[in-house]
Amino acid sequence: MPQVTQAPPPATLAPTQAVSLHINGQAHTLQLAPWTTLLDALREYLDLTGTKKGCDHGQCGACTVLVDGKRINSCLSLAVMQEGTDIQTIEGMGTEGSLSPLQQAFIDHDAFQCGYCTPGQICSAQGLINEGKAKTEAEVRELMSGNVCRCGAYSNILSAVMEVVGKELKIEN
Amino acid sequence: MNSFTFTQATAVAGAVQDNTAHPDAAYIGGGTNLIDLMKENVARPTHLIGLKNLGLDTIETLPDGGLRLGALATNAATAWHPEVESRYPLLNQAILAGASPQLRNMATDGGNLMQRTRCYYFYDLTTPCNKREPGSGCSAIGGYNRVCGILGTSDSCIATHPSDMCVALAALDTTVRVSGPNGERTIKFEDFHRLPGDHPERDNTLEPGELITGLDLPKKGFSQNFSYLKLRDRSSYAFALVSVAAALELDGNTIIDARLALGGVAHKPWRDQEAEALLIGQPATAETFGRAAAKVLAGAKGHGANTFKIELARRAIVRALKQATEMKEVVDTNAFQNSNP
């Protein structure tokens, strides 16, 4: 094991810059160091802790949010790169008593155990529905592969997403 | 992550100027690879130049019938662009075979070319790696090299280029458009990525400060007979151990034109035009495909844990060419995994 040493204090204070973000229909201006990821901006600066930090390397999908309606990994984007975009997090999906169809389907299908991956799963599933490409179970499985569930609730997650995908398809036809 | 400054560029010329003015500057598109490398301390730029406001995210048909992909178009927008879906389905398949939906929504087409190897030792700062630290040695040679290359390797590096999209771009004879301190120029796709040689720290032939602005696909898209066959350790969201982009133009059972490129086997997307020549004019049979595969792998060299890739690649080439000929599995299985084994 390498010896643990105290990190030296930074020679100069990190430069920060004003960053304007539009999140869940609300405008925010934050003073951030450029290295602040969108995920850290949400969790550490705006207290929007529904979005989860899993791997922090774009491998698990727990940090999934929607940017202009498209799902992305918020851990791999800098907050400064998201100026001018419309960001939606799990907090913007529904409210208690008025859940989004996907939130309700996840409850109805028992689509989680610990729940840590769930906000990312729901945001990702919403992105999948917005894309309109997945119609069969095989396609939903493939297009949900960016979200890992270590409890292994995959079959119920698939059922929940399929229910909402099915309703969307009916509306289309 | 080290401290850095960030500027959102508003024009290509300004971005290039900004890059030239800052030592250790880097352009950032989607950031999916660069930010990860910065978190790992493998990349340490002192200045980032954002590109999203350059207006380079369009996809447009060219007067000669080709298609220009803006460097900042996302991989997802490209894969699902109507012109790509209908005229370049090989490219659609290759893109959708890579990464995850979230990453494809962020990652840009120019950035896809610029992504770096996923060789374990490149990411591991505690081990020597000539690509990360020139002159330090290669830990993969004689190490854990299951994912490493079998073609065009050197004594300095056996890393592979990780892209799926680039394998299709190589097969489709794409041209890379770049802008730099000395103006604009184009680079043939096969000349864009390098073999490692004695300088594995250099992935490509871009000059300092040069920026990819677009990718031009020629008119010919091989939309009738094609296959992107990707072999990996799990059926989704994994890098290729071996992948094959095969495209054919057939007259009955005779091959009129052919393209063949491999991923996961070399420091660059591995197109083999001599193997293509062995296909052209021949009947589309297993014997013909076998001869082409033997040509591709004639100079292949295993390094122990990855030696299995030689036989795997041989069989994958034959299967991909068969799939491209028959176009059966494309109809039989789902739209996103039609080339999986």
Image (cartoon, coloured by chain):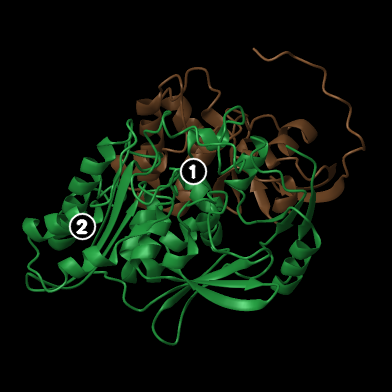
Chain colours: A brown, B green
Which chain does the numbered disc 2 sit on?
Answer: B
Quadrant where the C terminus of chain A lies? bottom left
Place of residue B156 in the rendered image (x, y in percent of width and height, measured from the top left): 49, 43
Q: Secondary structure at mark 2?
A: helix
Disc 1 to disc 2, C-alpha distance: 25 Å
Quadrant where the N terminus of chain A lies? top right
Place of residue A117 in the rendered image (x, y in percent of width and height, measured from the top left): 53, 27
**Which numbered circle lies on residue B156?**
1
* Nearest to the observer: residue B63 or residue B305: B305
- How many marks overall? 2
Residue drawn at 71 percent across, 48 percent down:
A25
Q: Amino acid at mark 2?
A: Lys
Which chain does the numbered disc 1 sit on?
Answer: B
Q: Secondary structure at mark 1?
A: loop
Tell which circle, 1 or 2, labels the residue nearer the N-terminal end: 1
Q: Circle 2 is placed at which residue position?
A: B295
Q: Is residue B145 above or below residue B319?
A: above
Q: Residue furthest right?
A: A12
